Amino acid sequence: MAKRNEPVRKSVKDVLEDLQAGHREAAFSGPESALKYLRRTFESQASLPNAVKALAYDLAADAQAQVGAWEDCAGSVGLVLGYLPELEAAFPHEYRRLLEGLCCFERGIQAQSELGDFHGALELCERAMGLGLGAHYSAKRDSLEWAR
């Protein structure tokens, strides 16, 4: 009887590196190409780790903002925020660096503002400030104070 080959099991870090490499290559042709790559990744990778999904949706939010797909961008930002606990659990030592590299707060504020949801934009500013992501979110919040 022949020995069955076990499926290759990649670590979450390896899956993330593969995603980032594929995205870099696709994004070279523009945001539409990057979105196509990410869409295909989501469709073909049903078991994509949630921590990787956080970063994939962050990449999607950036590309969606670049093409002006504001509702899709806002949806992707919501998904990123939902997966932050899994990102922290999977990358406890790199979480801060990964968090600071996310564009979801910037793009989310932009999307909410474009959609006229200034309260949503304010909430994202508050959340970013709560995570200690920089004083510029305080300035953004101050510029949106009129919406309260």
Image (cartoon, grey):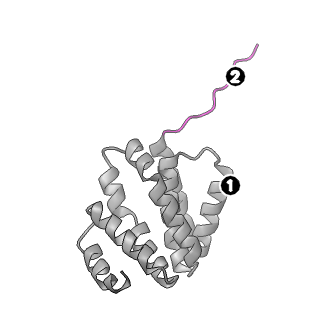
Location of residue 33 by image quarter: bottom right
Q: Is residue 10 magenta?
A: yes
> Circle 2: is it few (<14), some (14-19), or many (20+) Cα within 10 Å?
few
* Disc with the residue nearer the chain's start (1 vs 2): 2
Q: Is residue 9 above or below residue 137?
A: above
SS at circle 1: helix
| Picture quadrant where residue 3 is located | top right
User: Which residue position holds label 1?
Assistant: 43
Q: Position of residue 75 (x, y in %)?
A: 55, 67
Q: Position of residue 34 (x, y in %)?
A: 57, 68
Q: Nearer the viewer, residue 88 or 14?
A: 88
Residue visible at 36% across and 80% down in the picture: 148
Instruction: From the top left corner, tell me how far across and down residue 35 is, in percent.
Output: 60, 68
Q: Is residue 30 visible?
A: no
Task: Identify the residue at image location x=52%, y=71%.
Answer: 74
Residue furthest top as drawn: 1
- Magenta region: 1-11
Give the numbered dot on residue 85. none
In this rendering, would 73 be left or right of 46?
left
Amino acid identity at mark 2:
Arg
Q: Residue at x 56, y 35 (%)?
A: 9
